[in-house]
Image (cartoon, rainbow, N blue to C red):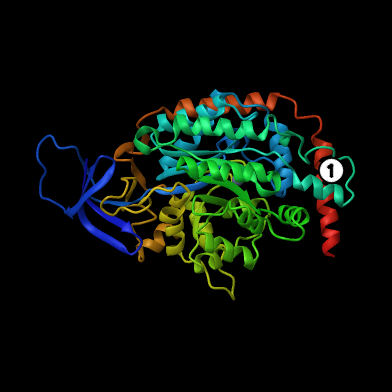
Amino acid sequence: MILAGVDLLVTPGDLRVGVDVALEDGRVAAIAPAAASHPGGADVLDGRGLLAVPGLVNAHTHSPENPMRGLGDGLALEPWLARLMGESGPYSGEDHYWCALATAAELLLCGCTSVVDHVGMTPLRPEGFDGVMRAYRDAGIRGGMAPLFSDHDATADLARSLGVVGVDGPLIPQMAPALPTREAIALTDDAVARWHGAEGGRLHLLTGASGIQWASEELLVGMADLARRRGTTMQLHVLETRVQDAACRARFGGGSGVRVLSEWGVLGPEVSMAHGVWLDVDDLDLIAAAGGVVVHNPAANTRLRSGRARVRELLDRGVAVGVGTDGAASSDDQQMWFAMRLATLIHRGPDEEHVSSGDALAMATSLGARALGVDGLGTLAVGAPADIALLDRASFGLAGARDLEAALVLSETGGSVRHVVVAGELVVRDRVPVRFSLDDVHAAIAEQRERRLREPADPRLPETIARIEALRAALARTRA
Ligand SMILES: [Zn+2]
């Protein structure tokens, strides 16, 4: 395919005006001044009036939250999570399929071409992996999923140590592991063998764990080793809230969760850590030294009152910081333009070195791409994967752009996205998905919403939330 006569943003700081971009074998094959005409029969997309930018990378989300939007507004993460797990009910393989397809649809339509989907399954089983991966195969997005599995709850240990009564198993009962850790790792290995690298390398099966405070050493080390052995990447949550940080320090004799990840050999360029809100200076240095990847989720961190990640300090240390939306019940959409804008706007206090719009653009493209470990992804240099968003320059966001890159981040909403290309294939044409019906997606999500609303919530939910609030209050007293 040839994108003819486009303005091409190869990477922030490198804009080529009026060029033809040839795409071959899923990659950018050549960039040349626009030709006056093209041979008959050539596959040409008229790109005049369009700005081609690297497709955005959503480096952290949870597709099963699609039918749970708006849940628990105003709650902090822990009680919100208890409600999510206590009110959502189970997911079949087919449910996972439609949730992932809805995620792909929302992302593709606004020019986001890659996703890392951190998927909790109830329980972890092959049909869950397959439902999600079939959706990303069918949608045409560059899709990766990582399993979200828990086998040890240090937040429950912390609650018991602070005198919270009635905590017998995990603080949130649904987090009790439904299968042994070695079986979870074996199931993941099996899914990696079936899916990782499929569709010409467009599909990724990552290893993963829920988070340090919810996982054993066996699980974390096992999943990191599996990622390295299989040539894939891994994702986990890291220190999203004060409760999680306190649980790790109580478990590890005062040391931080990140220090223990380092000691266990988990940290590395293959491992992306979502959130990283409660990192201390030592953690920042350890992550930088290990070449680790952090995924910033400004919408969810603000919505759930978790705090603000130390993004500027991470970037200054050379850490690859990506951007994620987080799940659709915590942020509450998959709008990467909004996430990218928040990633610069919330770091602008009067006395701080801010995160610039250019930083945010790099985070949402080439830096976030490290979570998938694909060379060149997130740029449009010759040889890079041909993942491209084509935006109308005649639009509110771009027509009046005095500074094009700043306007992309600060003014664009995704509403200007006209066409989207993934791995050289046109998957959105004139704002319509090419490979699937949006009506089917909306109908399937509405059906899930209604079915889940009809099911009674887990009867243990009120007591669970009461225990979580008792833990939060006890922690506040230790700080007073
Ligand atoms: Zn998350």
What amino acid is at disc 1? Ala
Tag 1 secondary structure:
helix
Q: Residue at x 37, y 62 (%)?
A: 405
Residue 293 coordinates in the image, percent (x, y): 51, 55
Looking at the image, residue 131 lies above or below residue 341 = above
Residue 356 coordinates in the image, percent (x, y): 47, 66
Image quadrant occupied by the C terminus: bottom right
Ligand 1, by image quadrant, is top right
Image quadrant occupied by the N terminus: top left
| Quadrant of residue 447 within the rendered picture | top right
Looking at the image, residue 438 lies above or below residue 240 = above
Residue 98 at least partly seen: no
**Ligand 1 neighbours mark 1 (CB distance < 8 Å):** no
78 displayed left or right of 357 = right
Q: Which residue is mark 1?
A: 466
Q: How many marks?
A: 1
